[in-house]
Image (cartoon, rainbow, N blue to C red):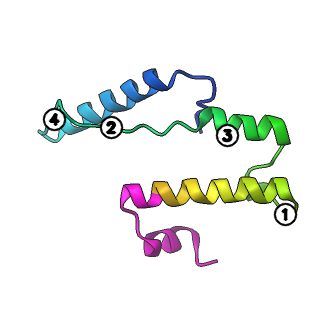
Amino acid sequence: MEEQQRLDPIALKSNWLNTLRRGAQKLGRTLADTIDVTFPYYGDALDRFIRNYNIPVTSDIKTRGGKVDDEFLVFQAECAEAFRKGSGVTNAQVDAEYGDF
């Protein structure tokens, strides 16, 4: 996974939009010039959590508990749910990929 902390969110947004434009062009489509894009940038927030609390990634957590871990896990779940909804991925698709917990 490419790390994005301490990168310029404006440059990242521009890169993502240029990539989206190229993808659309390959499909014979174009993006409207008036498209309004909100670009969520969590790179610094995630990096701050990791540096300040030395929190392992979710897949590395064997035991849970404690205020810091719980707060970060809630943050991760909220981000994942926002990404899932925003991309149109269904709960059934998530379950098919990762299993039903």
Q: Are marks 4 and 1 in contact (CB under 8 Å)?
A: no
Q: Are marks 2 and 1 in contact (CB under 8 Å)?
A: no
Within the magenta stretch, is there residue 4?
no
Picture coordinates of residue 77, whole percent (x, y): 62, 60
Q: Identify the residue position indicated by label 2 in the image.
A: 37
- The secondary element bearing badge 4 is classed as loop
Picture coordinates of residue 68, whole percent (x, y): 83, 53
**Magenta span main SS:** helix
Q: Is residue 28 left or right of residue 78?
A: left
* Foreground of the two, 94 or 73: 73
What distance separates the C-alpha of mark 2 from that of mark 1?
Answer: 38 Å
Q: Earlier in the sequence, mark 2 or mark 3?
A: 2
Q: Earlier in the sequence, mark 2 or mark 1?
A: 2
The residue drawn where x is 15% and y is 35% is 30
Looking at this view, name the residue that lies furthest to the bottom: 100
Q: Identify the residue position indicated by label 4 in the image.
A: 32
Q: Identify the residue position indicated by label 1 in the image.
A: 62
- Please give the range of residues in magenta: 84-101
Quarter of the image holding residue 6? top right
The residue drawn where x is 59% and y is 78% is 100
Residue type beneath disc 1: Lys
What distance separates the C-alpha of mark 3 from that of mark 4?
Answer: 32 Å
Q: Earlier in the sequence, mark 4 or mark 1?
A: 4
Label 3 crowd (10 A; few <14 / some 14-19 / many >=20): some
Residue type beneath disc 2: Val
Q: Earlier in the sequence, mark 3 or mark 4?
A: 4
The residue drawn where x is 58% and y is 58% is 78
- Is 10 located above or below residue 49 in the figure? above
